[in-house]
Amino acid sequence: MQQKSRVLIIDDEQIALRNLEHIMKKEGYEVTSTQSGTNALKLLEEQQFDLVITDLKMEKVDGNQILRRSKELSPDTEVIMITGYASLQSAILAIKKGAYDYITKPFKLDEVRKVVKEALEKVMLKRENQQLREQIDKFAGKVKFITQNPVVQKLLETSRQIAPTDCSVIITGESGTGKELFARYIHFMSQRADGPFLAVNCGAFTEELLTNELFGHEKGAFTGAGNLKKGLIEMANSGTLFLDEITEMPPSMQVKLLRVIQEREVLRLGANEPVKIDVRFLAATNRDIQEMIKAGQFRQDLYFRLNVVSFRIPPLSERKDDIPLLSYYFLNKHSVIQKKVVSDIAQEVFALLMNYDFPGNVRELENIIERGVALTNGPMIEIAQLPEDLKELSIRTFRKKEGKYPSLEDQELSYITWVLQEVGGNKTIASQILGIDRVSLWRKLKKYGLEEA
């Protein structure tokens, strides 16, 4: 269960204090409040808060002192200033000293909720960033599949259960979703973790080269074979062989691979006697393997041998809750690689990333963050460092979900919902963008149960 955000409110005006306290509790935050700046300093030393909301003008201890002490004790805690219109200049100066934002009296409820929500989101992202740094240190040299998505976490849980069993596995999913990383994770969690993990892309070689790569050859087996060469299958002994894009393997090679898996032995090209092997086989494809079996392009018996357990890695568009976590992971990674101090990503950047469908999946996200690190001259990736096409438009892709193509109605509903979100729910503007009148839009909203959208 996620812990409630902890908010400290300081205001020497009792009515203002109670109003803010009421708003924050109604939003579900854990609230501590005080009318005394002196008491607030004591609370900051004794307790940990995610957010401090403090009046700027107070006797004895004012908001600037609260800000300074809060940042000294907990740099990641955000501070919001409360000010009257007459003190706006002072509030702006406070922001330059590290305050997140300011709220003017009298309060506007929507503004208070918005500013507080955004401040706490920033705190959450900082915390996740720190957790990622700790995870990176902890898993240095090992494999860590970064996710907070419930579906992917369930996949990882299942993979941990089957990892020690040595069963063959097929991993499916779009290009760039992390199929090889998932395979490495299974290997790392297995009893073969100390053995080799070797990977080969079955679509990257001609049949002749792939045969030599997998099976190896004896000295003198063909012209130019001056020395004995062990193939990847033999080299993966006591470890794992990952066959990426297995569906690109030629049919004649599929027959040879099937025999290796069945007999647990490999015959080098030009050899008379086979070599016994102890290898676990993991395979992956971005294609519909069942359709390829029906079309006679992939052997069903090989599929049954490999498909003891199967996993489908969802595209990034189906696990957008992973985008902040992955973004900070790649930020840390490429800051180190490029020897730059870049530690944050602007909220405006995340707004664009969360509204983008990532046809290139996790690989594309990493490229975007790597580019941002390379182009920024400061400690933060800003909108200016994003690719032009990402700044100008949001690419929406048509994908199968749970093995089914989306219907025209699914796409219409998705597009109408997206347009309404883009224009802040303004139905007049939305109807103009959609090229229909307001009545037609109202009918569609009613059809899809979105009358209140």
Image (cartoon, grey):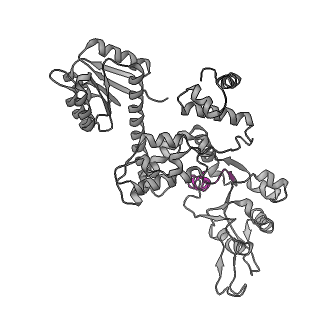
Q: Can residue 424 be seen in this view?
A: yes
Q: What stretch is highlighted in magenta?
A: 170-189
Residue at 73% across, 69% down: 265
Q: Nearer the viewer, residue 98 or 145?
A: 98
Q: Position of residue 370 (x, y in %)?
A: 46, 55
Q: State the image coordinates of residue 329 (x, y, percent, origin top left).
A: 46, 49
Task: Tell me: residue 135, above or below residue 8.
Answer: below
For the residue pair 377 and 162, the one nearer the viewer reads as 377
Q: In this view, does 286 lie to the left or right of 148?
A: right
Q: In which quarter of the image is the C terminus?
A: top right
Instruction: Decide: is 424 above or below 20.
Output: below
Q: Is residue 292 left or right of residue 175?
A: right
Taking the spot 62% from the left edge, 29% from the top edge, the residue there is: 431
Percent x, y of residue 229: 65, 79
| Near-viewer residue (390 or 441) | 441
Question: Residue 182 in magenta?
Answer: yes
- Where is residue 301 drawn, in percent x and y? 82, 57
User: Outermost residue, top direction?
Assistant: 15
Which of the pair 93/315 is nearer the observer? 93
Residue drawn at 58 percent across, 47 percent down: 358
